Image (cartoon, rainbow, N blue to C red):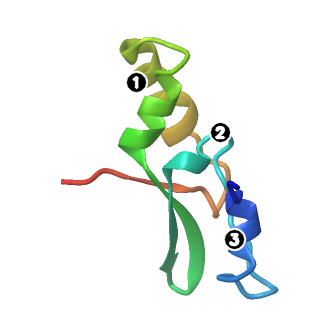
Amino acid sequence: MNIKVEDKLADYLDDEESILLADGFDDAFLGIGRQFGKPFAIYDKERCLRILQETMSEEEANEYFSFNVEGAWVGEKTPIFLEFL
């Protein structure tokens, strides 16, 4: 049984806290990071790109991700996309 990210969050966030999740990228979700006490969703950028490449070419996935996902400001709780070095 696959548990959705939303179902796991209640164990890690206080009642007053919330984070924004990136639609369609549950398999790339790494966890929650905090900056100045505020929680943020953290995703593996490479996994996000692989998810997009299931339905589009590598070039299309990179362009789409750059503009519509990583480059989208959706407020103070905008998710973070981690690049491993």
Q: Identify the residue at image location x=57%, y=31%.
A: 68
Q: Which residue is mark 2?
A: 24
Q: Which residue is mark 3?
A: 8
Which tag is nearer the camera, tag 3 or tag 2?
3
Which tag is nearer the camera, tag 1 or tag 3?
3
Q: Label 2 sits on what residue type?
A: Gly
Secondary structure found at label 2: loop
**Total labels drawn:** 3
Q: Earlier in the sequence, mark 2 or mark 1?
A: 2
In this rendering, position of residue 48 left or right of residue 11: left
Secondary structure found at label 3: helix
Q: Label 3 sits on what residue type?
A: Lys
Q: Earlier in the sequence, mark 3 or mark 2?
A: 3
Q: Which residue is mark 1?
A: 62
Q: Which mark is residue 49?
A: none
Query: How would you rate the neighbour count of disc 3 (Cα within 10 Å): few for under 14, some for 14-19, many for 20 or more?
Result: few
Query: In this orientation, which residue lies closer to the viewer: 54 or 39?
Result: 54
Residue 20 point in image, percent of width and height: 69, 59
Q: Looking at the rendering, in which quadrant would you find the N terminus? A: bottom right
Query: In this orientation, which residue lies closer to the viewer: 85 or 55?
Result: 55
Which tag is nearer the camera, tag 2 or tag 1?
2
Query: How would you rate the neighbour count of disc 2 (Cα within 10 Å): few for under 14, some for 14-19, many for 20 or more?
Result: few
In this rendering, position of residue 82 left or right of residue 31: left
Q: Identify the residue at image location x=37%, y=14%.
A: 59
Q: CA distance from mark 3 to mark 2?
A: 16 Å
Residue 3 point in image, percent of width and height: 70, 59
